[in-house]
Image (tube, grey):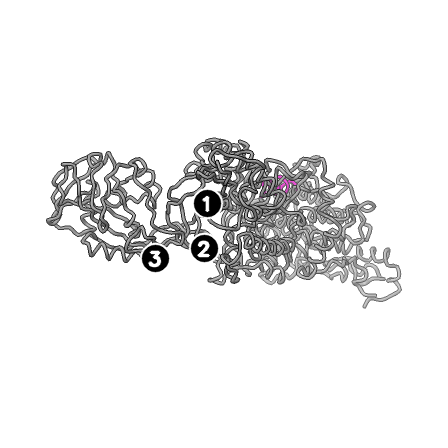
Amino acid sequence: MKMKDTLHLGKTKFPMRGNLPNREGNWQQEWEENNIYERRQKINEGKPTFVLHDGPPFANGNIHIGHALNKISKDIIIRAKSMSGYRAPYVPGWDTHGLPVEQVLANKGIKRKEMTTAEYRRKCYEYAMTQVDKQRDDFKRLGVQGEWEDPYLTLAPSYEAAEIRVFGKMAEKGYIYKGMKPIYWSPSSESSLAEAEIEYKDIKSPSIYVSFQIVDGKDLLDENTSFIIWTTTPWTIPSNLAITVHPDFNYVQVNADGNKYVVAKDLLDEVQEVLGWDNVEILQEFKGNQLENMTAQHPFYDRTSLLILGDHVTLDSGTGLVHTSPGHGEDDYYVAKKYGLPVLSPVDSRGVFTEEAPGFEGIFYDKANPMVTDLLKEKGALLNLDFYVHSYPHDWRTKKPVIFRATPQWFASIDQFRQNILDEIEKVDWIIPWGESRLYNMIRDRGDWVISRQRAWGVPLPIFYAENEEAIITPETVEHVAQLFEKYGSNVWFEREAKDLLPEGFTHPGSPNGAFTKETDIMDVWFDSGSSHAGVLRQRDELTFPADMYLEGSDQYRGWFNSSITTSVAVSGKAPYKSVLSQGFTLDGEGRKMSKSLGNTIVPDKVIKQMGADILRLWVSSVDYESDVRVSMDILKQVSEVYRKIRNTVRFLLANTSDFDPKTNGVEFVDLRSVDKYMMIRLNEVIKEVRDNGYEKYDFLHVYRTILNFITVDLSSFYLDFAKDVVYIEEEDSYSRRCMQTVFYQATVAIAKLLAPIIPHTAEEIWSYVKEEEEYVQLTDFPAYQVYANQDELMDIWTAFMNFRDKVLKALEIARDEKLIGKSMEAKVTIYPNEQVKSMLTATDANIAQLLIVSPDFFEVEEVGKEVPEEAVVFDDVAILVEKADGPVCERCRQVRSSVGENENFPTMCSHCAAIVEDEYPEAVQASFE
C-alpha cells in the first residue's frame, strides 16, 4: 500500500486547462438549444423591470475590440440584473442606413447612376443584412445573450414608420423648417453633416492679410485708404460680399510706410509686426459703428463689399475687420441677412467651384487656395502670406476636411424646445457625473439640427411639394406615408409617384391641377437611431419607456445620447433614458489610438480563437472603463494568468469537496470552528461588496478586484494554505474536515454565481460540478449575504490574528534566508506576546500551530513578560523566536513530531496519523507501505 493512499487527496474531473476556444461554442449551442435566455425571462416574470436599451452599432464589417467592450459590458449588466431579481430583457439593434453602405457598394463597382434609386436601395438593403448576420454571429460568440433572432433594425418597416411619426409630430409642433444657410458640408461624402458628425484634427492652412480699397468712405475716409482683413480660407475670397466690424471697438486710420489702412486700434501693434511696417502714424480714430455702410472694392471682381456691423467680431487675432462670405460661414450668414445681402455659395456638392466664381470654375476649393493668393498678389492686394497649424472640422466617417456651404436644407429648430431638453437632462442619473455637463453644454450651445441628407440609402423625408413649390407636411400625409412604410418599407417612396403616396383624393390649394412632387433627400442617420425610443421602446411589449439605461462610448454625447433626447423631448417632453453610462475608447498597450495603418488593432475573433471569449470578458471587468482603456495581446495574456489563478483555485475547492454532500455533511455556521466562521464572514462580506458596490454601481473593476483579492489573499494565501493539513490528513468524516469542506463548498457556489455575469462559460462549467438544484448557474440568483451574531467581535479577533500571522511569516522568512530552516514545518517557534496578543491568541479558539503551518510539538506561546532571547525577531507587540525543530518527521503529515514511532504498527508515523490510518485503513496494519 502506498502512503498517499491513506490521504484524502482531492480528485475532480474539472480540468486544469479551460480549453475555452474549443469548448465555449459547444456551451453556447447548449444554452441556445435549452432556451436559457428565454427561461431566465420566464423566471423573472412579474419582477421589477430593468431595460438597458441597446445603442445600434453600424452594420458594416466584423466587430472590433470597442464593440466587444461595449456589448460585453451590457451583457454583464443584464446578467447581473437578472440574477438580482429584475426582469432584464435585452433587444440588440443595428443602425443599417447611411453613407458607409453606399461607399462599400461603390467600391464593389456598383454604379448608382446606372439603375433606379429603388433598385440601388435594394442592393444597399441586401448588403446591410449580410453585415447584420455577420456581426450577430460575432456578438453571440462573445457569450452575449439576448433576442438575437428578433433584433431591431432601423431598416425594418415598423421602425421606419415609427421614425416617420416622430418627424410628423415634430412638424406638427412647428419644429421642422426649410432654410438656406451655411451648414457643415462634406465634399468627400457629398452631403450635409450635423454637428454630431464632426471631429477636429490639426491641418496646415494659409494665413493671409488682404487689402480692400475704399470706394465710399462716407466723408470719413478718403478713397486711397484700404481696409485690411485676415483669413485662413483664401478660397472664400471669391464669395466675399462684406467686411464686418464691431460697433463698439475703436478703429484707426494709419499711414504705414506711405500707404493708408484701417485696422482695430488694439491690434495695430500685432498687424504692424506681421506686415513688417517700419513707420506707422495714426491719422484718426473712430468707433466701428461709424464705418457702417461704407463700401470697398473687391480685390479682383467688379463689385463692392459692404461694411457692416456684427457682435461676433473679436480682438483675439487678425485685424478687427472680418472677411464676410454669407454662403460660407454661420456668423457671416446671420449678420449679412440683417443687411439684405444675398447668400453666395459658388461651390457645388463635390467642393468644386461653379460659374458663380469666374476664373475658378471646375477647381476643387482647396486647390483654389494658391490660385486665389497668386491673383491677390497680382492685384497688389496680398499684404502677407504665411502658414500655420490649427484645429479644423473633419467628416468623422471619411476623415476628410469639411466646409461651410449654404444649401437648401431641412432643419429641426432646437431653439423652440431647447430649455425642455436641458430640464430633462437635469433629471437623468448620470453615472459618470461629467456626462451631464458635457451633454448639457452641447445642447445649450448647439444650433438648429440639419436633418436632411443628399443620399439614397436612408429613410426619406415624408415631404411633398405643391405646384407652387409649397412644402406639404400635414398630419394626414405623414400618417399615410407611415402606414405605407409599415406595410411596404420605405422603398415604396422611390417606387411610386408622389400622387400615389398621398392619401386618396388629397387636394391642396397650391396644386390647382392636382400635380405634386416629393422630397428626394433622406433623414440624417442620427434621426434614424435617435428615434429608437419610438421604434423600439414604445413598440416592444417586453420593454419600457423610458429605458432604465443607455450605455455607449463617450463619443455618443454628441451622437446617440444627443439625438435620442432631442427627438424624445420634442415629441413626448421626456428623456428616453433614466440613466446614462458612458465608456472610454480602446487604446493599444502604449496608449495609442488603434488604427490599421499602425497595425495595432486587436480583433476579437483572433483573441477568442487563441484564448477564448471568457478572457475578453474578464479583461472588460479588469479595466476602468470611465476613461480610455488599454488592450494588447500582452495585456490579455496577463488577464489569462489571472483566469488561470481563478480556475486553479476553484479546481482545488472542487477536488476537495468531491466526497462532500452539503445536505448530509454540511455544518451549520453556529457549529463551525472559529477560523471557519471567520472565512464564512469574509465570504459574506465579499458577496455584499460585490453586489452592493460592484454590480449595483456598474463597477466591474470593483467586482474583479474584490473576488480576486478573496481568492488570492483569503483563500490561497491563508485558508487553503493550511487546509491540506486538515482535508488531506484528517479522517474523512472528521469534524474539522467537514467544517472546512462546508466553507469550500459555499465559497465555490458563491464564486460561480458572482462570476457568472463576467465569465459565464467558466461559471457554468464550475456549476456542473456542484450539487445544487438549479440546472444552470445562469438561472440562479446571486447569493444572499448574511449577517451573523457577534460577527464584528469575531472579525476584530481574526483581523488581529492576521496581523500577528504576518509577523510570524516575516520571522520564518528571516530564518529561511539564514538557512536555519527550509519549510515552515521544520521550525520550532516560540512566541513572546504582550497582553493583547496573548488574549487574542486565546480568543481565536483555534489550533494556532496548524494555522501557521508549523509542527504543534514545536510551537509554544510563553507567558506575558517572559524575557525575550536576543536572537528573537522583535515587533511592537510580540517577539518571535525561530529555531530548528529537532525530531523525526512523520511520513504521512510531514510534521516534526515527537510521537513518531510510538505505534509499533506504523513506525514512521506520528501517533495522530497512526490512529487515523488504523481506524480508516485497518488493512494497512498487515501491509507495509511502499
Looking at the picture, which amino acid does disc 3 mark?
Answer: Gly
| Residue 722 visible to an observer of this rendering | yes
Residue furthest front in the image: 513
Mark seen at residue 398: 2
Element type at mark 1:
helix
Mark seen at residue 466: none
Crowding at label 2, few (<14), some or many (≥20) Cα neighbours within 10 Å? Answer: some
286, above or below 186, in the image: above
- Where the N terminus falls, by quadrant? bottom right
The answer to which of marks 1 and 3 sits earlier in the sequence is 1
Task: Report, in whole angstroms, how far the alpha carbon at label 1 lies from the one at label 3.
Answer: 30 Å
Closest to the observer, 655 or 595: 595
Looking at the picture, which amino acid does disc 1 mark?
Answer: Ala
- Magenta segment's dominant SS is helix
| Whole-percent x, y for residue 808 in the image | 62, 51
Q: Classify residue 689 by image quadrant.
A: top right
How many labels were placed on the picture?
3
Question: Label 1: which residue?
Answer: 196
- Where the C terminus falls, by quadrant? bottom right
Question: Label 3: which residue?
Answer: 362
Task: Report, in whole angstroms, how far the alpha carbon at label 2 lies from the one at label 1.
Answer: 14 Å
Task: Report, in whole angstroms, how far the alpha carbon at label 2 lies from the one at label 3.
Answer: 22 Å
User: Which residues are drawn in magenta?
Assistant: 687-698
